[in-house]
């Protein structure tokens, strides 16, 4: 059981003033985060991380850097489905990384990112060996209720140290979900230059779905104390890497004046005060990613092209255009497909437009790159299933005549997916927004002459992750909008 004192420790920094106005790492060296799935079996990271986990467990409850107190920060404050999802989590993992380094006496300690797209989304064997990395050995139990004023909106949390993944089962092992995490899916998210679409897509699809697939049915990863699982930090490092790569491609994160006072603690355990805006310059925070530093020259992925060097030579338009909205609230039930029909009179005409970029970045001479326009679905005001029932993944299809819960994500009608993670706050009555890329199935229908003239049918198929999943999960969608981007 959590004691009142522990609760106060978790949030206690708010009563210790003044805060230090410091960003993580003021050291001169920039830590380079590497790909976990490409690390050598004997990489020192594994033993260093195990040591940090063990030492943080040994810290007294009064130390805000203890393993449990670090997890409680998440349960109290994490902003899921909100404007600062990426910014908040960047601070969260970076202060944690510095605490690990301090505690093992190696300021260069660097978290790797769990690249979901490699090795079928499996974790390295060290996460299953008998070490503190395996989530079982240190036997954390969550058993926590965040204070009612907390920002996170989580309610009673009761999870245990288990994972649904095994040595041989990864995020992509189940054919129903395999296409959510591959390079193509992640790339297409990175090519969304609108921050709002990009952030909701990376959060709602690979981030949320991995939380559910790792944590099902009652592991830490499924709930607010998910950071009790050592893999959490590497999972969020990957989310952060995708954002950092998106930023490096010269996409713009809007100004955010939100500030955090005493939510995070530095490596000495002192509460810090930072603004969301300060997270935008990650190198100033002391870290970068190997994927950014070693980016191969000459790539023509439009996402990697700096905006100022791009000249639209075809006037097919770059702006986001709404192609239709369906506004009726629909209820969706597990294993039952819900068809959302949107009238889209301009769809066909917009489908095969493309634009030509002039690319100069990393190139000895300018070259042209072409990107076709894309069709996105934005599901708005999505209410969450009841507590315990959120352990589902909602697969999204377009005009699939034989829809069933068993259809794999390799089916040509499959568009994408979303999952639920983080209870929406009580005040957030409008529910969450999810973004799904419909381009592939819509384009195929058009090529086969099967695209209906003025209407698009988007099908939601909520499925259980494991056979013991919730039998009657129910959620509502307030509206769906089809966008051309
Ligand atoms: Cu979170």
Image: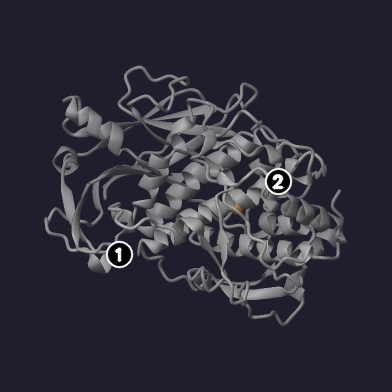
Residue 95: percent from left, percent from top: 66, 66
Where is mark 1, residue-wise? 306
In the foreground, 338 or 483:
483
Label count reads 2
Residue shown at the point (38%, 51%) measured from the top left? 190
Residue shown at the point (16%, 37%) measured from the top left? 348
Q: Secondary structure at mark 2?
A: loop
Mark 1 burial class by Cα count in 10 Å: few <14, some 14-19, many 20+ = some
Residue shown at the point (26%, 62%) measured from the top left? 363
Residue 350, image quadrant: top left
In this view, 412 is above or below 73 = above
Q: Are marks 2 and 1 in contact (CB under 8 Å)?
A: no
Residue shown at the point (75%, 67%) measured from the top left? 102
Q: Is residue 409 visible?
A: yes
In this view, 453 is above or below 39 = above
Where is mark 2, residue-wise? 229
Residue 161: percent from left, percent from top: 76, 39
Residue 311, image quadrant: bottom left
Per the rendering, the mark at residue 149 is none
């Amino acid at each position: 059981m959590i004691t009142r004192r522990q609760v106060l420790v978790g949030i206690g920094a708010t009563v210790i003033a003044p805060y230090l106005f410091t960003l993580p790492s003021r050291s001169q060296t920039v830590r380079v985060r590497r790909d976990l799935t490409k690390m050598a079996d004997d990489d020192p990271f594994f033993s260093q991380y195990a040591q940090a986990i063990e030492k943080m467990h040994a810290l007294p409850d009064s130390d805000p850097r203890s393993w449990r107190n670090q997890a409680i920060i998440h349960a109290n404050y994490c902003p899921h489905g909100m404007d600062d999802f990426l910014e908040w989590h960047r601070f969260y993992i970076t202060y944690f990384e510095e605490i690990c380094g301090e505690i093992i006496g190696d300021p260069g300690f660097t978290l790797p990112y769990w690249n979901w797209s490699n090795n079928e989304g499996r974790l390295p064997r060290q996460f299953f060996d008998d070490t503190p990395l395996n989530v079982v050995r240190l036997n954390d139990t969550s058993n926590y209720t965040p204070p009612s004023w907390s920002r996170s909106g989580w309610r009673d949390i009761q999870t245990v140290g288990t994972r649904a993944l095994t040595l041989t089962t990864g995020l992509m092992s189940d054919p129903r979900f395999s296409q959510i995490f591959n390079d193509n899916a992640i790339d297409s998210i990175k090519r969304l230059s609108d921050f709002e679409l990009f952030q909701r897509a990376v959060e709602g699809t690979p981030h949320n779905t991995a939380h559910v697939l790792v944590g099902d049915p009652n592991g830490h990863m499924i709930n607010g104390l998910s950071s009790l699982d050592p893999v959490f930090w590497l999972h969020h490092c990957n989310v952060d890497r995708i954002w950092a790569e998106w930023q490096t491609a010269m996409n713009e994160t809007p100004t955010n004046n939100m500030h955090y006072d005493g939510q995070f603690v530095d490596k000495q355990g002192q509460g810090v005060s930072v603004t969301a805006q300060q997270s935008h310059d990650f190198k100033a925070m002391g870290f970068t990613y190997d994927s950014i530093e070693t980016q191969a020259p000459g790539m023509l992925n439009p996402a990697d092209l700096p905006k100022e060097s791009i000249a639209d030579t075809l006037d097919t338009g770059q702006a986001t255009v709404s192609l239709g909205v369906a506004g009726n609230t629909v209820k969706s039930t597990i294993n039952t497909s819900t068809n959302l029909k949107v009238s889209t009179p301009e769809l066909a005409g917009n489908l095969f437009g493309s634009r030509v970029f002039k690319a100069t970045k990393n190139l000895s001479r300018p070259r042209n790159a072409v990107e076709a326009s894309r069709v996105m679905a934005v599901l708005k005001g999505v209410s969450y299933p009841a507590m315990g029932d959120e352990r589902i993944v909602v697969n999204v299809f377009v005009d699939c005549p034989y829809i069933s819960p068993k259809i794999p994500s390799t089916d040509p009608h499959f568009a994408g997916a979303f999952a639920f993670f983080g209870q929406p706050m009580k005040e957030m009555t409008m529910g969450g927004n999810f973004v799904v890329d419909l381009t592939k199935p819509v384009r195929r229908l058009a090529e086969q002459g099967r695209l209906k003239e003025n209407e698009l049918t988007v099908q939601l198929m909520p499925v259980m992750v494991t056979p013991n999943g919730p039998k009657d999960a129910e959620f509502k969608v307030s509206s769906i909008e089809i966008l051309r981007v």
